[in-house]
C-alpha cells in the first residue's frame, strides 16, 4: 500500500518542480545557443563586406573631386567609424559567441572588450549623425552663415573631439570594468545619444518646414534659377541624410526598447548580460552593428558617382589593347 505521508508528498512535489526547472533551463540554453549560432553566422558574413564597402566609400570621397562636398566628407568620417565596427566590434562579438558555443567559462574579458568598443562606436556614430544633420540645417536654413561656420578646420575639430570622447568611453570601460564604472559610462552614453536624437528630431522639423517654404516659392517663381538648382542639390543631400538617420533609428530601436524594458522591470542589465542568460542580447548587438553594413549601401543608392566608383573597384573593366 502506498505511503502518502506529508514528507513523501513534499519530496514528489520538489522533484517535479526541479524537473520542470531543469527542463526550462535546457530549453533556455538551447534557444540561447541557437541565437549565438545564427548571429555569429550573420556577423561572419557581413563583417568583411562592411569593412570593404566603408573603405570604398572613404576612397571614393578622397579620390573623386565631385564627391568632396562637406556633406560627403562627414559621411566619409561616419564610414570610418563603420569600418572600425567591422574590423573590431564584429570580430570580438564573433569570438565572444564562439567561446559561448564551445562552453568556455572564462570569456568575461572578451565581453567587456566587445561591450566597451561597441558603446564607444555607437556614441561616435550618433555624434557624427548629429554633425551631418547640423551641416544640412546650416546649408538649408542658415545659408548666409554656412560658409563661415562649416569650414574644413571646424569639421576637423568637431570630428577629433567626438573621437576623443568616444575613445574615453572605450578606455575607461577597459581599465575598470566594474559595475559602477559601467553604469556611469552607460548613463553618459545614453545622455549623449538622447541629446543627439532630440537635436536631430528638432532639426528635421525645421528642415521640413524650410523645404515646404522653398517649394512654395519655387512654384510661384519667386526665386531665381540658380537658387532653384542649389535647393535641388541640397534637398538631394538632405534625403540621403534622412535615410541614413532612419537606418540608424531602425538598427538602434531594439537596444533602446530593451533598455527601457529592463528599467521598467528594474532588471540589472549588466548582471543579466554577464551571466549570459539574456536571449535577445545577441540580436540587439547584431542590429547595432548591422547599421555599419547598411550605411554604405544607402550612400551608393543615393549617389550615382559613388556607386560607379565602388562598382568599378569591385569589377574593373578591362580596356582593349591598342596596336
Image (cartoon, rainbow, N blue to C red):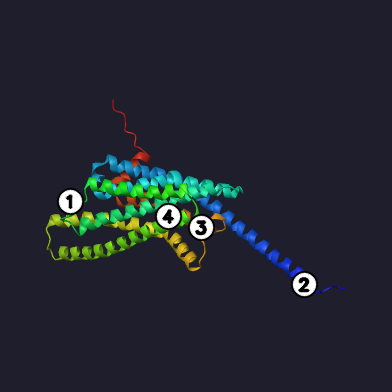
Residue that numbered label 3 is attached to: 270
Q: Is residue 233 left or right of residue 5?
A: left
Residue that numbered label 2 is attached to: 9
Residue under the image location 35 percent in, 52 percent down: 298
> Nearest the camera: 205 or 12?
12
Residue 157 in picture, x, y percent from top left: 27, 47
Q: Earlier in the sequence, mark 4 or mark 1?
A: 1
Whether residue 46 is visible, yes or no, is no
The circle on residue 185 is: 4
Badge 3 crowding class, 10 Å Cα cut-off, few under 14, some 14 to 19, many 20 or more, is few
Residue that numbered label 1 is attached to: 148
| Mark 3 → mark 1, Cα distance in angstroms | 45 Å
Q: Locate residue 138: give its quadrant.
A: bottom left
| Mark 1 → mark 2, Cα distance in angstroms | 83 Å
Q: Earlier in the sequence, mark 3 or mark 4?
A: 4
Element class at badge 4:
helix
Look at the numbered discs 4 and 2 and tell me whether their residues touch, using CB distance below 8 Å. Answer: no
Q: Locate residue 13: give its quadrant.
A: bottom right
| Mark 3 → mark 4, Cα distance in angstroms | 12 Å
Element class at badge 3:
helix
Element class at badge 2:
helix
Badge 4 crowding class, 10 Å Cα cut-off, few under 14, some 14 to 19, many 20 or more, is many
| Mark 4 → mark 1, Cα distance in angstroms | 35 Å
Look at the numbered discs 1 and 2 and tell me whether their residues touch, using CB distance below 8 Å. Answer: no
Amino acid at each position: 500500500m502506498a505511503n502518502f505521508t506529508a514528507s513523501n508528498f513534499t519530496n514528489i512535489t520538489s522533484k517535479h518542480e526541479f524537473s520542470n526547472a531543469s527542463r526550462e533551463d535546457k530549453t533556455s540554453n538551447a534557444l540561447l545557443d541557437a541565437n549565438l549560432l545564427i548571429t555569429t553566422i550573420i556577423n561572419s558574413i557581413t563583417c568583411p563586406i562592411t569593412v570593404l564597402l566603408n573603405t570604398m566609400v572613404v576612397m571614393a570621397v578622397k579620390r573623386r573631386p565631385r564627391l568632396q562636398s562637406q556633406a560627403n566628407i562627414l559621411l566619409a568620417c561616419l564610414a570610418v567609424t563603420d569600418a572600425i565596427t567591422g574590423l573590431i566590434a564584429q570580430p570580438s562579438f564573433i569570438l565572444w559567441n564562439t567561446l559561448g558555443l564551445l562552453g568556455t567559462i572564462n570569456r568575461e574579458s572578451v565581453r567587456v572588450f566587445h561591450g566597451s568598443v561597441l558603446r564607444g562606436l555607437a556614441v561616435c556614430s550618433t555624434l557624427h549623425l548629429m554633425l551631418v544633420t547640423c551641416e544640412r540645417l546650416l546649408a538649408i536654413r542658415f545659408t548666409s552663415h554656412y560658409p563661415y561656420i562649416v569650414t574644413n578646420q571646424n569639421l576637423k575639430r568637431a570630428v577629433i573631439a567626438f573621437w576623443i570622447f568616444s575613445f574615453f568611453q572605450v578606455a575607461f570601460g577597459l581599465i575598470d570594468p566594474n559595475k559602477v564604472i559601467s553604469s556611469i559610462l552607460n548613463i553618459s552614453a545614453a545622455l549623449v545619444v538622447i541629446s543627439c536624437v532630440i537635436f536631430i528630431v528638432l532639426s528635421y522639423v525645421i528642415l521640413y518646414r524650410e523645404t515646404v517654404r522653398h517649394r512654395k516659392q519655387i512654384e510661384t517663381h519667386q526665386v531665381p534659377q540658380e537658387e532653384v538648382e542649389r535647393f535641388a542639390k541640397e534637398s538631394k543631400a538632405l534625403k540621403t541624410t534622412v535615410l541614413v538617420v532612419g537606418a540608424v533609428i531602425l538598427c538602434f530601436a531594439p537596444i533602446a526598447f530593451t533598455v527601457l524594458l529592463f528599467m521598467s522591470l528594474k532588471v540589472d542589465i549588466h548582471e543579466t548580460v554577464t551571466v549570459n542568460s539574456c536571449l535577445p542580447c545577441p540580436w540587439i548587438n547584431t542590429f547595432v552593428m548591422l547599421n555599419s553594413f547598411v550605411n554604405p549601401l544607402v550612400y551608393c543608392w543615393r549617389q550615382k558617382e559613388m556607386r560607379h566608383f565602388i562598382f568599378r573597384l569591385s569589377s574593373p573593366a578591362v580596356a582593349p589593347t591598342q596596336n
